[in-house]
Image (tube, helix red, strand yellow):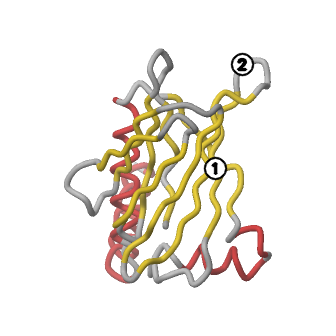
Amino acid sequence: MNDAHDDRLLARLGQLFQESDPPPADAVELARQSFVLRGLDAELAALVEDSEAATGDAGVHRQAVAVRDPGTAPQPRQLTFQVVGPHGGDEVIIAVQVESVGAHRRLTGHLAPQGPARIEVRQPAAPEARRVDADGRGLFVIDGVLPGPMSLTCRRAGAPAVATQWTLV
């Protein structure tokens, strides 16, 4: 009998939160899109460095505010994603500079180890993934990226795909 009362109380609390402070649409979409990674059969590259977070508490605050209001970043932002091998060695590093260009973002990146690859950028706001090729040195540029959540997937011949965690740009 107590469980039924608890269930009603939790349902009412959930309803109150939904009405007074619903989750941001970007956060809900980001959570939904994260399930796409389950079907990629890709290794997940974790964000290991973010120049915005490295600037101290103010940078962390700006990043937290960006969930509700993506805004534009005045300075280029450096992001580094990494997959660590089973023996502690780096398998893949994806380093990206994010620049604001008008209302969009330009991603300029490089891969380590160097080499050609197909890079895909996925965004909830975009109807389909955009694809570019990294050259023999592992360099790539993606223009016209929308502000908000994005994830990159790197595909190389003879290697498993690597997908970055979702990140706000």
Left or right of 138? Residue 146 is left
Q: Quadrant of residue 112?
A: top right
For disc 1, the marked residue is 47
CA gap, disc 1 to disc 2?
Answer: 18 Å
Q: Position of residue 117 (x, y in %)?
A: 45, 33
Give above or below for 119 relative to 90: below
Seen at 52% across and 29% down, the residue is 43
Label 2, secondary structure: give it.
loop
Residue occupying the point 39% across, 57% down:
30
From the viewer's perspective, is residue 83 above or below residue 49? Answer: above
Of all residues, the one furthest to the front in this rendering is: 136
Q: What's the residue at 38%, 74% (across, down)?
A: 104
Q: Quadrant of residue 70?
A: bottom left
Q: Amino acid at mark 1?
A: Leu
> Measured along the vertical axis of the image, is residue 134 above or below residue 29?
above
Q: Residues within 10 Å of mark 2 (few under 14, many from 20)?
A: few
Q: Which residue is mark 2?
A: 86
Locate residue 132: give its quadrant. Answer: top left
Three-letter amino acid code at disc 2? Pro
